Amino acid sequence: MSSQTTTDNDYESASAGASSDVASFEPHRKGFVGHFHDMLHTTPALVPLIVLVGAIIVFGLLLGSKFFSPFALTLILQQVQIVGVLAAAQSLVILTAGIDLSVGALAVLSSVLMGQFTFRYGIPPAIAVALGLTVGTAIGALNGWLVSRVKLPPFIVTLGMWQIVLAANYLFSRNETIRSQEIKAEAPFLQFLGIKFQLAGATLTLGVLLMLGLILGLAYALRATAWGRHVYAVGDDPEAAKLAGVNVHRTIMSVYMLVGFICALAGWVMIGRFGSVTPSASTGMMGNIQSITAVVIGGISLFGGRGSILGAFFGALIVGVFELGLRMAGADPQWTYLLIGVLIIGAVTVDQWIRKVSA
Amino acid sequence: MTKTLTRKAGLLGAVALGTLMAAPAFAAEHASASACLITKTDTNPFFVKMREGAAAKAEELGVELNTYAGKIDGDNETQVAAIETCIANGANGIMLTPSDPAGIADTVQQARDAGILVIALDTPLDPIDAADMTFATDNYKAGVLIGQWAAGQLGEAAADAKIGLLNINISQPTVGVLRNQGFLEGFGIDLGDPNKWGDETDPRIVGHDVSDGATDGGRRGMENLLAIDPEINVVYTINEPAAAGAYEAIAAMGREDDVLIVSVDGGCPGVDNVEAGVIGATSQQYPLLMASLGVEAIAKFAETGEKPEATEGKNFFDTGVGLVTDNPVEGVESISVAEGKELCWG
Amino acid sequence: MEPILKGRGLVKRYGKVTALDRCDFDLYPGEILAVIGDNGAGKSSLIKALSGAVIPDEGEIHLEGKPINFASPIEARDAGIETVYQTLAMSPALSIADNMFMGREIRKPGIAGKIFRKLDKAAMEKFARQKLSDLGLMTIQNINQAVETLSGGQRQGVAVARAAAFGSKVIILDEPTAALGVKESRKVLELIKDVKARGMPIVLISHNMPHVFEIADRIHVHRLGKRLCVIDPKQYSMNDAVAFMTGAKVPDEAQAA
């Protein structure tokens, strides 16, 4: 490229004679902070885990054996089981850079459907549960279709769906609570996930085991299957994922359908935990905020593609530990909300720091 | 005016003192008995008064008291978690104003199985015997009193009254049903099913709406009712904040002199509103008494194992109700606004 | 010699705008064909038609003499045409290995793969490492590091390596040096020559005339939605090329397409 370039061209004339050195590919900065930063980058669930262990230790020291007992510690698991299951669902959506405001309402509607199918229409409880799960999945599919095909923002779609589902819940249930005694007598299967067993002072329910199994199963699927990698890729950059050969529509549909299914499961967990079926359960109003809180404290980025579902589980547990610990200490409940607010802002700050990779 | 101010300042001091005493709860580890108070929310003055009454009595008897509250009215989950905390803390007794009287029954049973005395305050559980005892205002009677008073005020015109009812919320909690149906009964209307509102066929009823027991909700609900029939002349409200909201809506139409508003609660702002003519009459209840009697019962239970008994002829312990108005109606027992002010809360 | 990738009479309209106007295209085996043209000349529509990202309204495309109709980039990829997009189409938060295998992951053999759909990470990492070192990119030490921790040149390198690893017939490179500094551009140009040396035909879209004239065997000049001419970089200057592109100069009959 000599004879031509000597003429009066104005393209990068300087670069023509530039050295042909290889670009430098040295590893980036190290040192303690660097190492820690790398570790957080590869294992984002580490921060909430540290906070969780720290919180348990602090409350253990403050409250002694009352808190540091198998009873109290497993009580936390029981208290977070609904939010934990919803947070698992919320994690999936948020990993795709979406958000689902309808999770709590969907759980309540599913529990109401399971109950009313059994009591109003006399459908066998097992089939009623299956129907509830099916409806949950179908509503999830509708959310997914509106997001993926109609290209509406997830926030808008699920904001609408939240109201629709909540209203449908009140209309369908006619505001009737199905009492625990009736369920126990006539359809104990609905309370299946409430079955308790004792283990050296610890109390576990099937609902708690379901939550743990769900979290571990999803953690495996996200980490070790192609589907999981696609969920991350779609959340990170849907355009890039599409060009790289990921079926973005199918991935988003699968996520929202799975989320609907998991929310319906949460509805079944609710029947187990509260015994009764209540259309006015506050999960319908607050389940979305609670699950988003757990997910954010768990270090999952609201911008999608980053974080781990274990983090969200730790996030739910952190909230549970704070709530129980502060309650047992007799503190004003407002302190709990105040601290959770601090945690949310702290978690997002850490997330921003982790994302700054080339600093 | 000066007198009111002084009294209010004194009240404020008492509240502050109560809070101070309640806050360092785990300093009193060696108390003879421990009690939990779980209210629907911790912002409603009714529950603030309840906590105040409980805290004062607990201090007097040396009972350790922990208080909990739901995030919003209707928040069953937080109340369930609070009961579980009380079990874990090894409390002797729990006083509970249930947000979801049927939904929470299972958790209450767990507490009773753990040997804890459970007293429902203000709102009975569903079924009522799910708790060891209920300390409450006779809400039905409270309703009947304002119903009778309203009918008495109207006299002949009661036969052509146009009635709007502002309830609490669409889930029809027991307390809301009792007050509503009591009012209709007192007014002389056929109830249909006394366990729910909305099934009455009397043409004098314009409609039922909800207020969430708050001023903004009351105004919105009243506007809805006025949209159905602007000629409404009798308004039942679930409580006084809802009544204040309803009054705003009515005044906006310039009909404040033609409409009779009745309410239930007896909070100080409510009684002030009776004095100001915003509310015609209100049935006053006594939350402070409920809570202090509850603490007493728990202390006694911790000491002797004896459970409280129901008021004769009722399936709960009646803490009393008084009709507050300066326009008494013959045949309906009432107290004056001045007396009501002495006894009011919030 | 028969072109490996051939387009004839390609037309693509967007509403009233005609992006491709009966355009022809030829890529011969083993060559680097540069595609140059002014902004809006329809270069990217041409490339998208060849890579399956848009479906032409009219015209035919032949790969190795056989007619093809791609409905998506995935179909083009399955047929052996790999494209490195200007945006690189990589997920920054995922690892190099994850990105190289995105959409074509390898599953473990046996039950773990069939029922639990477990990925064979070891095999994928080994393959990725192999491909990177083939292209002399093994200075990247950790195959599991996130792509966003790489420099621009390294990312480009990984994207080219991905295309070279899977593209069996044709590789299309869209502005591979546009976002890079001088040194990194140099490195990437070496990489492209490396890939060509393995006998892989390459389509290179670039605005950078020195880069085009350095590595292209032939230059396809695109103007007003069609191929204006094909020139030999050894016989024309960059100024000529720019003049053709902008219409300041009309090519001889001999070169005109």
Image (cartoon, coloured by chain):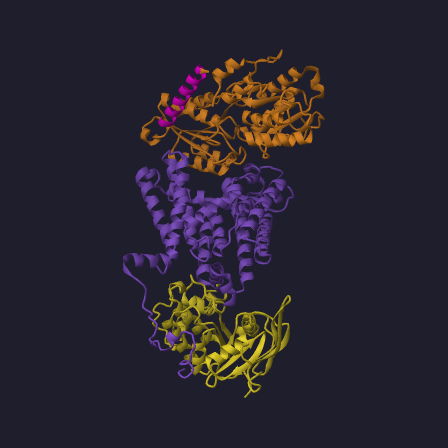
Chain colours: A purple, B orange, C yellow
Quarter assignment of residue C144: bottom left
Image point (40%, 19%), residue name: B10
Q: Position of residue C202 (x, y in %)?
A: 48, 79
Q: Which residues are magenta?
A: B2-20
What residue occupies the far bottom of the structure in this picture? C1
Q: Is residue B280 left or right of residue B6?
A: right
Residue B196 visible here: no
Q: Is residue C9 above or below residue A96?
A: below
Quarter assignment of residue A204: top left
Q: Position of residue B135 (x, y in %)?
A: 49, 23
Q: Position of residue B136 (x, y in %)?
A: 51, 23
Quarter of the picture holding the N terminus of chain A: bottom left
Q: Is residue B34 above or below residue B2?
A: below
Label the magenta part by its dominant secondary structure. Answer: helix
Quarter assignment of residue C185: bottom left
In the image, B63 versus A256, the foreground residue is A256
Count of marks, rendered view: 0
Residue B54 in the magenta stretch? The answer is no
Q: Is residue A164 above or below residue B335?
A: below
What residue occupies the far top of the structure in this picture? B330
Residue A243 visible here: yes
Q: Position of residue A336 (x, y in %)?
A: 40, 39
Image point (39%, 33%), residue name: A332
In the image, A116 versus C107, the foreground residue is C107
Residue B7 in the magenta stretch? The answer is yes
Quarter of the picture holding the C terminus of chain A: bottom left
